[in-house]
Amino acid sequence: MNFRCVACLLVSIAGAAGARSDEVPAWAHFWLGEWYAAYNARDADALASTYAADARVNDWRGREQIVQGLKQEWQRDDFLCTGRWTKMMVIDNVAVGWGDDACQPRKGGALTDTQWLSVHRRQSDGQWREEQSLWNLPNSPPSAEMDIPSWAHVHLAGIHDAYNSRNAEAIAARYVPTGRINDWIGHQGIIDGYKQLWSTTDDVCTGRWIALKLGGGMGVGWGEDVCRPKTDPAGEVTKYPWLSVVERQADGRWLEVLTVWSVEGEAVAAQ
């Protein structure tokens, strides 16, 4: 749908992580069909009901704002859309999916292809509803950090400190017990994955958030790491874009649920 365009960085990350094709569950296909049916019927209330009560869709928070935002959007654009999931990762009660769609003006015209990112959580009634939806982002991420809360900076700094000191257990502790980094699943999978990685590299890394969207006790953010050989500070620098899903715990801490890395990274000139 034309208002759900996702930043190219997210698309590149999704593509990089696409070596493993996680099966999209039946409920997600049904949910998406209901979403498009409501969108094409211009039924804002039905569409809003597919979201959690406190969902966040860019700057719209909660179903009432989603309804009002959709109605304003439809006054400007009159598209018919179809779409599909291209990838989904499901971890316990949280699902993160990428998709694409094609939209065409009702009066005819060129098709517009877009990509989007969606985060769902299984609700207390057993239904899966969307809690985060990312669209209308710039074609490239902003260069400056935007409204990143202090806990997120502390969280990321802790991960890099643990990475550079080769403390895999400390990194794993910043994830929920069933957390996932690409294909490393659970605390032990994360620990084993890092230890294997460190047997092949001596790099040290710093990083930053580029953007972080919070809502409904969950957050979706993306950023980049900058790594260089520890034994050669003037050596080649490699940038790794990443996507992170975080969740607020009952004790108030924010822990990561899912991290998706770029597989190969982007080599840049030493700085």
Image (cartoon, helix red, strand yellow):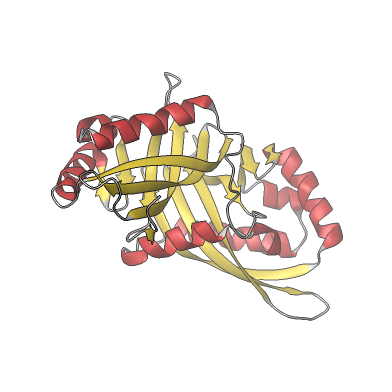
Q: Which residue is drawn at 81% across and 59% down?
A: 74
Q: Residue at x 38, y 63 (%)?
A: 16
In the displayed structure, would residue 259 be above or below residue 172? below
Residue 243: x and y in percent read 44, 49
- Report whether residue 209 is seen: yes
> Which residue appears farthest toward the top when viewing the image?
251
- Horizontal side of 158 relative to 10 (left or right) equals left
In the picture, residue 139 is in which quadrant? bottom right
Is 28 or 98 nearer to us in this picture? 98
> Which residue appears farthest toward the bottom when viewing the image?
109
Residue 103: x and y in percent read 69, 71
- Report whether residue 127 is seen: no
Q: Residue at x 43, y 58 (%)?
A: 13
For the N terminus, the image quarter is bottom right
Residue 52: x and y in percent read 59, 40
In the displayed structure, would residue 173 be above or below residue 133? above
- Horizontal side of 206 relative to 210 (left or right) equals left
In the displayed structure, would residue 200 be above or below residue 246? below
